[in-house]
Image: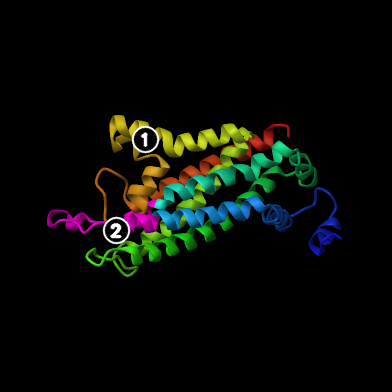
Amino acid sequence: MSSPTWRRDARIPGGHYRFRHAARMEWIKLRSLRSTLWSLLLVVVAMVAVGVVTMANTKAPSADKAAAFDATNNVLAGVAVGQLVIGVLGVLVVTGEYASGTIRATLAAIPDRRLVLAAKSAVYGGISLVVGEVVSFVTFLAGRAALGAEVPRPSLGDAGVLRAVLMSGAYLAMIGLIGIGVGAITRHTASAVAVLVGVTFVLPAVIGGVSGTMVAKFFPTIIAANSLAVAKPVSGVFAPWTGFALLCLYTVAVLVAGERLLARRDA
């Protein structure tokens, strides 16, 4: 038996869907896939586990390093793992339909391809933001509890801590949106994942090893690790709000490129 949602949408003539209809369709697609739930659950488990293990092994800083000690940055180390899963799932939101051929049905029902990508971005971006913020706060609280008694414990009321936790959650949502954009650009899962992994993990490590932070600081992972997730400033990298603005620019640029290519190419 068809659901009431599908019955309501079925009465709308083809090509006359609005944003709310497209968003509802994308929501149904995402929640009906078992892989979505398991992937997001993996993000939660991995980030919390990395945060707890990292904090459990964090030692009290020596007197000469106490001023620069940033336990908040340590507890949010699991963002590096979370971004991979969130990003790959974002890629699959687009490329999965190309692989299965269902993209033709989607575009037949909604000829406005900008609307299709906007709906995918809004739904998955919203889900990623909620999951990112929740897991960032849970990780912070769980990791804080795992600290040894001799280690100074960060508090959400401390300067820069709440901002670092909130920005870490927002970062995961932006990586998810970048994954959608890359998926729309390549339309192929393997190549899109390769680009995503290359930009977030491989290139920053290689370039950082050669030039330090001079160039590597422009890559998303370095911005997240050394700008967004810090309560205390780190020299040689962007300030938190500057890094956040740069990430927003990257996200918009990739989505716009994906939208342009999606509109111009055949399904």
Could you tell me which secondary element the residue under label 1 belongs to?
A: helix
Q: Quadrant of the N terminus?
A: bottom right
Quick one: which residue is furthest to the bottom in this view? Answer: 157
Quick one: which residue is furthest to the top in this view? Answer: 210
Q: Is residue 200 left or right of residue 184?
A: left
Q: Nearer the viewer, residue 120 or 169?
A: 169
Residue 16 pos. (x, y %): 80, 52
The amino acid sitting under disc 1 is Ala
Residue at numbered disc 1: 205
Picture residue at 70% right of the left edge, 37% below the top = 98
**In the image, is residue 203 part of the stretch drawn in magenta?**
no
**In the image, is residue 70 part of the stretch drawn in magenta?**
yes
Counting labels gives 2
Q: Quick one: label 2, few (<14), some, or many (20+) residues within 10 Å?
A: many
- Magenta span of residues: 51-77
The amino acid sitting under disc 2 is Ala
User: Which label is found at residue 140?
Assistant: none
Name the colouring of the figure: rainbow
User: Which label is found at residue 71?
Assistant: 2
Q: Quadrant of the C terminus?
A: top right
Res. 37 image quadrant: bottom right
Q: Quick one: label 1, few (<14), some, or many (20+) residues within 10 Å?
A: some
